[in-house]
Structure formats: structure tokens, C-alpha cells
């Protein structure tokens, strides 16, 4: 990699991992789903001016935004509000496993015995984290983060079924549909949104800007540029910096304490996810533009037109 691209490859996962610490530290000012709604709405207002519209696929993107955005981030960050950021950022890594499972189920991506073993180990690592006393005493936030990972993986499956639309265009319109949806859902399941807007400090609004502009708009713009320039096998391993950053931020800035359960489970999860990433990235066969193999989803998408 060129030095500037190497710096970007390191910076983007660091920015993403730090987002967990930033969000966790902002929940005392904004409700979780409302915060995510502000994040994606603001990100959309930054990005949509630079990409072509997707009004012809509005129904599809509304579904993608609901499953991969409203459900996924709503569950994950509501769960994050009830558990340590350093623990949640490890549990979130299960979304990679769920995405691999869905790819095999719907796109017939073949998995070798070693990959299946790595997936099983990832679940074993998360089971170790679930055995941590604080998690066992209140398992609901933990289960919400896991369920959010399932929804995120399902959303990625729906995105893949859209065909090749361009990464920046997809994230821009994903945010445009998911952000308002989250704001509506927040009004239905949360309270105190207007009071939060009125009483939020400059630190709270700075956190919103970080999540929207730095983490989402700039982060994904840089990441998709790297994906376009280099092989996935060279770019994907840098993603593993995200949980490291999230753990470091939780310990350093939120005063969280890592227990033996979390450390042991986290090491197993990260090793498993690293193997899944590295073993599948070089083998991803190029797909012809416009060719989608997910026939049940094709029928669903046609019905949404």
C-alpha cells in the first residue's frame, strides 16, 4: 500500500471502534435509538449530494434500511446502553459469522471444514463472554447485541442482492432511509427526545457529529476507496483494529474493567473472526454486474417495486 492508503486503512477501523466509546458516553444525553437516528440522518445529509439518486429502488432500500439499519443498530446500541462498550464491541463481531452463514444459505458460498470450525469457535468465545458475572446478572443487553448482529448480517444479505450499486451510493441512501426510520421508531419506543435536544451539551452534539460525519460519512468513504484500490485480502484484516480500539477506549475513557471471562472470550472471538476474514477474502469470485443469485429475494424485491 502507499503510505497514505496504509494510514487510511489503519485510521478507519480505529474511528469505527472509537464510535462505541463515543456512543456509550453519550447515552446520558440522548436515547440510543434517537442517537442512531440523528447519526444516520446527518450522515445522509452529508453524502446524498455526491451520489446519484436511488428513487427507482426506494422500496428495496427502505427494507434494507429497516433490517440492516433500524433493527440492527437499534438493537445493538440499545444493548450497548446496558453493558460495557469493551464487551459489546467483542460480541458485535458475531455479525461476521452470521453474515458468513447467510452467504452460505442464500448465495451458496462454500465453506470448508476449517471455516465451520472457526464459526463454532466464535460462538464458543461469545459463550465465554456470556458467562461473565455482570452479563449473567442481566443478559438482556447481551442478547440484544447478538440479535442486532443477526439483523446486520441479514441487512448485508439484502444489500448484496441489490447487485453492484457502488459502495458510497449505497451507504448514502442506506443512511437516508434508515435515519428517518430510526427517528420514528425512537418516538414509539423511547422518551425524552425533545428534552434531550434542548438540554444536550456541546459534547453531546460533538459526539453526534463524530458518529455521523467522521465515523459514518468519512469512514465509509475512505473504506470504499481502499476496497476499490486493493484486494480484499489486503484491506479486510485492518477491520480487526476496530474491537481493539473499542476495548481500549472503554477501559481508558469509561473506566471499564476487563475480566478474565471477557479477555478469554474476546481472544477466541477475534482469532475466529480473523480466520474467517482471511480465508474468505481472497476467494471471493467476481460477480457479473446485475447478476443476483438470491432468487427468493428477487421475488420479494419485485413485489416492492
Image: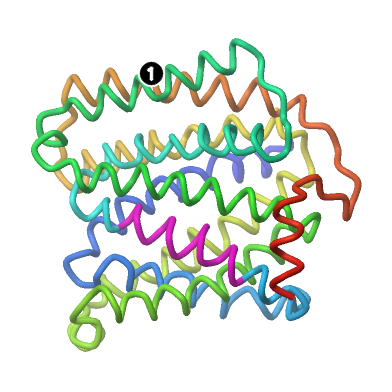
Residue 225 x %, y %? 72, 51
Q: Is residue 191 above or below residue 67?
A: below
Residue 161 x %, y %? 73, 53
The answer to whether residue 44 is left or right of residue 161 is left
Q: Could you say which quadrant of the image residue 71 lies in?
A: bottom left
Along the line of sight, the residue nearer the viewer: 84 or 217: 84
The answer to whether residue 15 is left or right of residue 103 is left
Residue at 34 percent of width and 51 percent of height: 20
Q: Could you say which quadrant of the image residue 31 lies in?
A: bottom left
> Tag 1, which secondary structure?
helix
Residue for badge 1? 268
User: What segment is highlighted magenta in the picture?
Assistant: 62-77
Looking at the rendering, in which quadrant would you find the N terminus?
Answer: top right
Q: Could you say which quadrant of the image residue 49 lies in?
A: bottom right
Q: Is residue 207 above or below residue 268?
A: below
Along the line of sight, the residue nearer the viewer: 211 or 139: 139
Residue furthest to the top in view is 113
Along the line of sight, the residue nearer the viewer: 127 or 221: 127
Looking at the rendering, in which quadrant would you find the C terminus?
Answer: bottom right
Q: How is the image coloured?
A: rainbow
Dominant secondary structure (helix, strand or loop) of the stretch shown in magenta: helix
The answer to whether residue 184 is left or right of residue 42 is left
Q: Is residue 1 above or below residue 120?
A: below
Q: Is residue 19 above or below residue 99?
A: below
Magenta segment: does it hold 76?
yes
The answer to whether residue 48 is left or right of residue 95 is right
Q: Residues within 10 Å of mark 1 (few under 14, many from 20)?
A: many
Residue 55 x %, y %? 73, 80
Amino acid at each position: 500500500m502507499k503510505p497514505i492508503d496504509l494510514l487510511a486503512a489503519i485510521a478507519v477501523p480505529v474511528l469505527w471502534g472509537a464510535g462505541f466509546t463515543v456512543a456509550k458516553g453519550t447515552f446520558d444525553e440522548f436515547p440510543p435509538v434517537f442517537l442512531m437516528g440523528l447519526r444516520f440522518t446527518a450522515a445522509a445529509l452529508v453524502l446524498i449530494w455526491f451520489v446519484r439518486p436511488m428513487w427507482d429502488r426506494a422500496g428495496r432500500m427502505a427494507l434494507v434500511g429497516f433490517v440492516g439499519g433500524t433493527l440492527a443498530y437499534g438493537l445493538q446500541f440499545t444493548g450497548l446502553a446496558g453493558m460495557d462498550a469493551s464487551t459489546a464491541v467483542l460480541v458485535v463481531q458475531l455479525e461476521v459469522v452470521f453474515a458468513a452463514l447467510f452467504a452460505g444459505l442464500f448465495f451458496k458460498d462454500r465453506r470448508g471444514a476449517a471455516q465451520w470450525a472457526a464459526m463454532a469457535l466464535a460462538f464458543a468465545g461469545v459463550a465465554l463472554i456470556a458467562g461473565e458475572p455482570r452479563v449473567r446478572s442481566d443478559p438482556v443487553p447481551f442478547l440484544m447485541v447478538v440479535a442486532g448482529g443477526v439483523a446486520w448480517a441479514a441487512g448485508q444479505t439484502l444489500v448484496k442482492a441489490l447487485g453492484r450499486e457502488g459502495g458510497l451510493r449505497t451507504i448514502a441512501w442506506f443512511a437516508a432511509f434508515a435515519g428517518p426510520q430510526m427517528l420514528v421508531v425512537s418516538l414509539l419506543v423511547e422518551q425524552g427526545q425533545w428534552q434531550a435536544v434542548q438540554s444536550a451539551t456541546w459534547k453531546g452534539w460533538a459526539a453526534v457529529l463524530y458518529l455521523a460525519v467522521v465515523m459514518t460519512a468519512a469512514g465509509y468513504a475512505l473504506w470504499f476507496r481502499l476496497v476499490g484500490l486493493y484486494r480484499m485480502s489486503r484491506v479486510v484484516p485492518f477491520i480487526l483494529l476496530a474491537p481493539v480500539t473499542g476495548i481500549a477506549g472503554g477501559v481508558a475513557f469509561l473506566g471499564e474493567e476487563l475480566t478474565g471471562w471477557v479477555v478469554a472470550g474476546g481472544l477466541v472471538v477475534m482469532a475466529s473472526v480473523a480466520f474467517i476474514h482471511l480465508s474468505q477474502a481472497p476467494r471471493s469470485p467476481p460477480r457479473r454486474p446485475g447478476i443476483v443469485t438470491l432468487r427468493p429475494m428477487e421475488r420479494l424485491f419485485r413485489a416492492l417495486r
